[in-house]
Amino acid sequence: MKKKFALSFVALASVALLAACGEVKSGASNTTGNPVDEKTIKIGFNFEETGAVAAYGTAEQKGAQLAVDEINAAGGIDGKQIEVVDKDNKSETAEAASVTTNLVTQSKVAAIVGPATSGATAAAVANATKAGVPLISPSATQDGLTKGQDYLFIGTFQDSFQGKIISNYVTNKLNAKKVVLYTDNASDYAKGIAKSFREAYKGEIVADETFVAGDTDFQAALTKIKDKDFDAIVLPGYYTEAGKIVNQARGMGIDKPIVGGDGFNGEEFVQQATAEKASNIYFISGFSTTVEVSAKAKAFLDAYRAKYNEEPSTFAALAYDSVHLVANAAKGAKNSGEIKDNLAKTKDFDGVTGQTSFDADHNTVKTAYMMTMNNGKVEAAEVVKP
């Protein structure tokens, strides 16, 4: 999410952002990269702090900054304080690439955390690679995004993982033998989940409809869907449209379960759907505040609530872990190339979203939760697997 903590976690923002790239060709890189300063370690933030998907980026910025504050208060990394260079990519792919260039060439950061989305991450990675600076996206979930990318790391599960989880859940938990699949056709994130779902689901897909990011009126498609015989709606997409679809579907009397990926994460989904109509909703998350958590996760929850006076989303938790992953990899490193090498060796790193080990492609599989929402509130969360 994704939206990841699905998320999404989660390739969105505008039609261009949602049409995320596949494999990215980065060209040659500076294997040494930027040097680590004697007194500070510079980390760049490249988040969607304004624009269409600011809900994801602002949550990640908050989680990342909390991690920095805690690390610095505890003495820093090898006695060096983290210096943050915080840039807003405005939820635009071109800006994400431009921000990356500025961070690696002007600010000379040793690592970048962000962007949040797959499309922006795909746009940013080439410039980071050329400079020899590792980039970790807390929540870019597009399958194949890291293929051939030595300097790109992903902090959450991939889209195909979510599609399989949704298939398993609607089949075995919701007993859905017939479903409607309603997909954001402008988003590689949503299309990746939908593709994986189609391949895994053994029941009948009675309708396979699409919408496009930026749409606001879904009445025509929902009217076609309403009279069909089905047990659930599977809705791969982001809160920006998914919330409106839920609102309009419930307003038309469609009361079947609606199931989505980590793109549903965040209060903005409820704002779009309205609490009154956001019931019988199920969505994937990489983090939960409603189930028993580890001591480390509880400490994060308490600290986040105290600092921001709000509940952390999975995006905030994933970004918090991403900063700690970078900090762990920066121990003893003399330059950004060594930080990259140390990140690649990460095994069983214990974070607030579970343990992280990067595979050969720098992807990770994390524990996932299926959240149950009624009246705009998450009432339950259960650990789920494909």
Image (tube, rainbow, N blue to C red):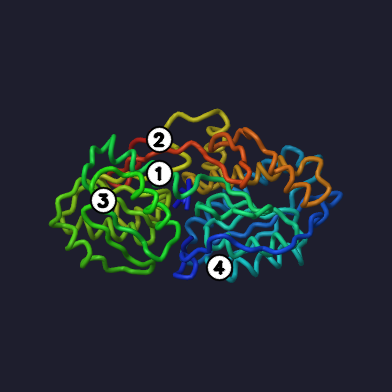
Q: Residues within 10 Å of mark 3 (few under 14, many from 20)?
A: many
Q: Earlier in the sequence, mark 1 or mark 2?
A: 1
Q: Tag on residue 284?
A: 1
Asked whether the residues under the numbered discs 1 and 3 touch, taking CB atoms below 8 Å apart as contact, a structural biologist would say no
Location of residue 31 (image quadrant): bottom right
Q: Residues within 10 Å of mark 2 (few under 14, many from 20)?
A: some
Which three-letter amino acid code belongs to the residue tagged 1?
Ile
Q: Tag on residue 93?
A: 4
Outermost residue toward the left in this view? 227
State the CA–CA distance, disc 4 to disc 3.
30 Å
State the CA–CA distance, disc 1 to disc 2.
9 Å
Which three-letter amino acid code belongs to the residue tagged 3?
Ile
Q: Tag on residue 233?
A: 3
State the CA–CA distance, disc 4 to disc 2.
32 Å
Q: Secondary structure at mark 2?
A: strand
State the CA–CA distance, disc 1 to disc 4.
25 Å
Location of residue 268 (image quadrant): bottom left
Q: Tag on residue 384?
A: 2
Which three-letter amino acid code belongs to the residue tagged 4?
Thr
Q: Does 238 appear above or below 372?
A: below
Q: Secondary structure at mark 4?
A: helix
Is 203 positioned to the left or the right of 80 in the image? left
Q: Residues within 10 Å of mark 1 (few under 14, many from 20)?
A: many
Q: Residue at x 38, y 41 (%)?
A: 165
Q: Earlier in the sequence, mark 1 or mark 4?
A: 4
Q: Does 64 appear above or below 25?
A: above
Q: Earlier in the sequence, mark 4 or mark 3?
A: 4
Q: Tag on residue 217?
A: none
Q: Nearer the viewer, residue 168 or 367?
A: 168
Q: Residue at x 80, y 57 (%)?
A: 34
State the CA–CA distance, disc 1 to disc 3.
15 Å
